[in-house]
Amino acid sequence: MLLDDTIPPLASYTTRALVDMFAIRRDTAVIRRAALCVFRELGPGLSECIYQNALHAELGANGICSKEVVSAVQYKGRSVGFHRYDLVYNATILEIKTTKLRVTRAPAAFRAQAAKYARHKRGEHSSVVLVVFTPAAVIVLVVPH
């Protein structure tokens, strides 16, 4: 079996990095199950607010989940405003979107917005997960930093 050269061997990671990596995977699995549960129960075509409230209720039973979390936006070390995240589960930001289009992957505009959150919140939160409710399915995507 050949290892991908782009992925460093496990020995090169610090213990903290490994713990963070496994926590992200665990939290993402919980988020994915919760999103599927909400989609199966409510079905397609509802507003983001309804899905957000349902996900908040579902995830609240599985860990620490906060709704409408406000965070300062920094520019050259100065606070220039505030941003409101849809949900924060443990240390993972959830960006919730809906679309009426039948898509099999998250639209580029949604991915770009979630990537912006990932770039700005590196130290504060472990990851950003984009959850898109479509007419046919729910898409859950971990956004890389």
Image (spheres, grey):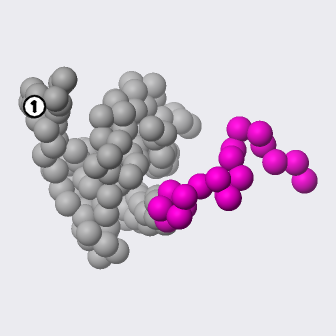
Residue 55: tell me if it is visible. no
- Residue at point 59%, 55% (across, down): 13
| Residue 21, x across and y down, in percent | 52, 58
Q: Quadrant of residue 77?
A: top left
- Residue at point 35%, 42% (across, down): 122
Horizontal side of residue 2 vs 118, given as left or right: right
| Residue 109, x across and y down, in percent | 39, 25
Which portion, as a residue range, is magenta? Answer: 1-19
| Residue 135, x across and y down, in percent | 43, 42
Q: Amino acid at mark 1?
A: Ser
Residue 16 part of the magenta-drawn span:
yes
Provide the secondary structure element on which disc 1 rests.
strand
Q: Residues within 10 Å of mark 1 (few under 14, many from 20)?
A: few
Closest to the observer: 97 or 92? Answer: 92
| Residue 33, x across and y down, in percent | 46, 65
Q: Which residue is mark 1?
A: 79
Q: Quadrant of residue 58?
A: bottom left
Closest to the observer: 82 or 95? Answer: 82
Residue 59 part of the magenta-drawn span:
no
- Residue at point 53%, 64% (across, down): 15
